[in-house]
């Protein structure tokens, strides 16, 4: 397996003024971006990489003393048998003393679900183990309403392309307000990704958005965690 490590970016809870979770983001050993690492993936090493990412994220989070939730991206198409594939993650959590009920698994960006029934079986098994499931990049690519209806995740993460300039674009803001209402009605936690400016944050908060993530709050920290308060 080629070398890699993780950076961690916080998801903030504006209502309670705290860090809700950290998302583990793959990086090269010298801090190279995710694209550099993912370019090395092949069908032959996909499964091993998916398993190694989970272990690395849990190991680093435990070592750094992460107190909130840990969000781990995973590749549904790399999971051949849910109960067997999750064992490595469970063993890593037990080995490093990281509580299983603080793990959230996120569908990785732009991955087409090849077999929806198989993906639902993954979600069902992960929930049995006490994990939460997040649908990443909602509103773009393959993460649409049909996927939401099929997979019923615990968390929806709105993509930056939906959030961008929402304080200057009444159409985007109207869409976001509708999604806030929908998420409340179906009991899903909604997270705004890619919040980069104060204006975006303020209109999102006014629209009822409680959870946010993005450069406005903190950039990913290479092999480290952000601490609250994020800024003086």
Image: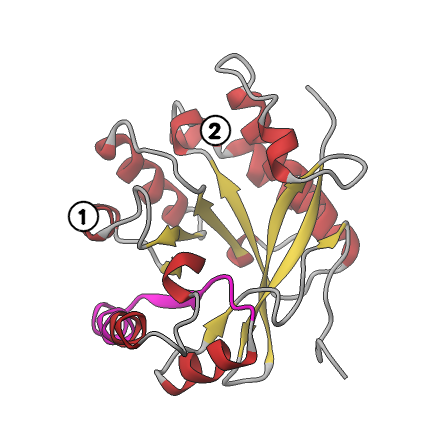
| Residue 138 rendering spot, x and y as whole percentages | 34, 54
The quarter of the displayed image where residue 196 is located: bottom right
Task: Give the residue pinned by disc 1.
Answer: 146
Q: Residue at x 30, y 33 (%)?
A: 113
Relative vertical location of residue 230 with respect to residue 98 in this rendering, above or below: below
- In the rendered image, the residue lying farthest to the top is 44
Relative to the observer, which residue lies in front, 59 or 46? 46
| Residue 224 rendering spot, x and y as whole percentages | 77, 56
Q: Residue at x 50, y 70 (%)?
A: 212
Examine the rendering and report whether any part of residue 94 can be seen: no
Residue 180 as seen in the image, left or right of residue 21: left
Q: For mark 2, give the secondary structure.
A: helix
Relative vertical location of residue 130 with respect to residue 29 in this rendering, above or below: below
Q: CA distance from mark 1 to mark 2?
A: 26 Å
> How many numbered marks does the figure carry?
2
Residue 19 as seen in the image, left or right of residue 191: right
Question: Quadrant of the image for the C terminus?
Answer: bottom right
Magenta-drawn stretch contains 179: yes
Q: Residue at x 73, y 47 (%)?
A: 60
Q: Residue at x 81, y 37 (%)?
A: 30
For marks 1 and 2, give the one nearer the viewer: 1
Residue 50 as seen in the image, left or right of residue 174: right
Task: Give the residue pinned by disc 2.
Answer: 85
Task: Give the magenta part as a residue range.
Answer: 178-196
Q: Residues within 10 Å of mark 1 (few under 14, many from 20)?
A: few
């Amino acid at each position: 397996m080629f070398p890699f490590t993780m950076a961690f970016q916080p998801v903030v809870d504006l209502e309670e003024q705290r860090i809700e979770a950290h998302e583990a983001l793959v990086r090269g050993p010298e801090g190279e971006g995710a694209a550099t690492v993912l370019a090395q993936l092949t069908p032959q090493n996909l499964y091993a990489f998916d398993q190694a990412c989970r272990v690395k994220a849990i190991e680093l989070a435990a070592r750094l003393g992460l107190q909130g939730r840990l969000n781990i991206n995973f590749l549904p198409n790399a999971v051949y048998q849910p109960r067997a594939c999750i064992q490595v993650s469970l063993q890593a959590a037990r080995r490093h003393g990281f509580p299983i009920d603080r793990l959230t698994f996120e569908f990785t960006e732009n991955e087409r679900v090849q077999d929806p029934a198989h993906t639902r079986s993954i979600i069902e098994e992960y929930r049995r183990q006490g994990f939460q499931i997040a649908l990443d990049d909602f509103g773009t690519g393959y993460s649409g309403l049909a996927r939401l209806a099929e997979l019923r995740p615990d968390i929806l993460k709105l993509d930056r392309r939906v959030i961008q300039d929402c304080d200057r674009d009444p159409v985007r803001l109207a869409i976001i307000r509708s999604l806030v209402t929908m998420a409340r009605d179906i009991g899903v936690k909604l997270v705004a990704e890619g919040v980069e400016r104060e204006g975006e944050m303020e209109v999102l908060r006014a629209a009822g958005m409680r959870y946010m993530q993005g450069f406005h709050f903190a950039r990913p920290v290479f092999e480290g965690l952000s601490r609250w308060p994020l800024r003086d």
